[in-house]
Image (cartoon, rainbow, N blue to C red):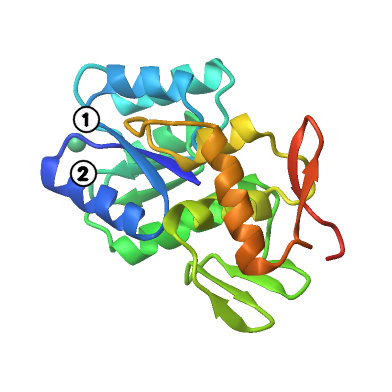
Amino acid sequence: MRVLVVEDEVSLAKQLVTALRHAGYAVDHAAEGERADLLGHDEHYDAVVLDLGIPKMDGLTLLRRWREAGQNMPVLVLTARGSWHEKVLGIDSGADDYMAKPFRMEELLARLRALIRRSSGQLNPELRCGPLVLDTRAGKVTLDREEVRLTSHEFRVLSYLMHHKERIVSQGELTEHIYSQDFDRDSNTVEVFIARLRRKLGSSFIETVRGLGYRMKAGS
Ligand code: CA
């Protein structure tokens, strides 16, 4: 899962990026609206945290531009404290949720998890595939109730597949959702992560659909 943070306040941006990386996301950061606009159009995010008060292009204009262009990733807006007006404008402009500053990081992480789950059609915070369970709250994977240790990239691959378990996910799509922008990407490494996941989880969960990609096996 990959998240874009749009925030100009240096220390808050740093806190957000650190907390999100720690929670297992690939994270990109933009400190102003024009760069955020480019990233939002060119890259593929599972969610965006958007401060409304940013330089070069304000957050509301940015959000409207994305929505007009059909960018439908979930967006959580950060508003100034007590500004009900900003909240209303944010929601009317296409925001999916909002939080007023200052906020608790734990709450932001929980809201973001819920947004990502809902946008991929998952209602339960525990994603299941038979005996394999990915708890999105704890960021943990268990197989027959035994915890399975995964690296951050393995976790992102499995998390993305389990969020979209009813369909085939191509290698290119996976690549878009597990790396941040500054990472030197190589789509071949997806195969490596899949192979490692199969070693750790057993080969019955992730199916290779020839020429198309991967899919969590239904009923397994
Ligand atoms: Ca700001």
Q: Residues within 10 Å of mark 1 (few under 14, many from 20)?
A: some
**Residue 191 visible in image:** yes
**Residue 50 visible in image:** no
Give the residue displayed 75% in from the left and 61% down from the top. Answer: 205
Q: Are marks 1 and 2 in contact (CB under 8 Å)?
A: yes
Q: Which of the marked residues, 1 or 2, is nearer the chain's N terminus?
A: 2
What percent of the width, then of the height, locates residue 58? 28, 23
What's the CA distance linking mark 1 and mark 2? Answer: 8 Å
The residue identified by callout 2 is 13
- The count of marks equals 2
What percent of the width, then of the height, locates residue 93? 47, 28
What percent of the width, then of the height, locates residue 119? 62, 45
Q: Secondary structure at mark 2?
A: helix
Question: Within the displayed image, which quadrant is ligand 1 positioned in?
Answer: top left
Give the residue displayed 77% in from the left and 40% down from the top. Answer: 168
Q: Quadrant of residue 110?
A: bottom left
Q: Quadrant of residue 54?
A: top left
Q: Nearer the viewer, residue 114 or 191?
A: 191
Residue 124: assigned label = none
Determine whether the beta carbon of the residue marked 1 sits less than 8 angstroms from the nearest atom of ligand 1. no
Q: Amino acid at mark 1?
A: Ala
Give the residue displayed 42% in from the left and 50% down from the top. Answer: 25
What percent of the width, then of the height, locates residue 71? 55, 24
**Direction from residue 11 to residue 71 in the image, left or right:** right
Q: Amino acid at mark 2?
A: Ala
Give the residue displayed 58% in from the left and 57% down from the top. Answer: 196
The residue identified by callout 1 is 31
**Direction from residue 80 to residue 89 in the image, left or right:** right
**Direction from residue 212 to residue 178 in the image, left or right:** left
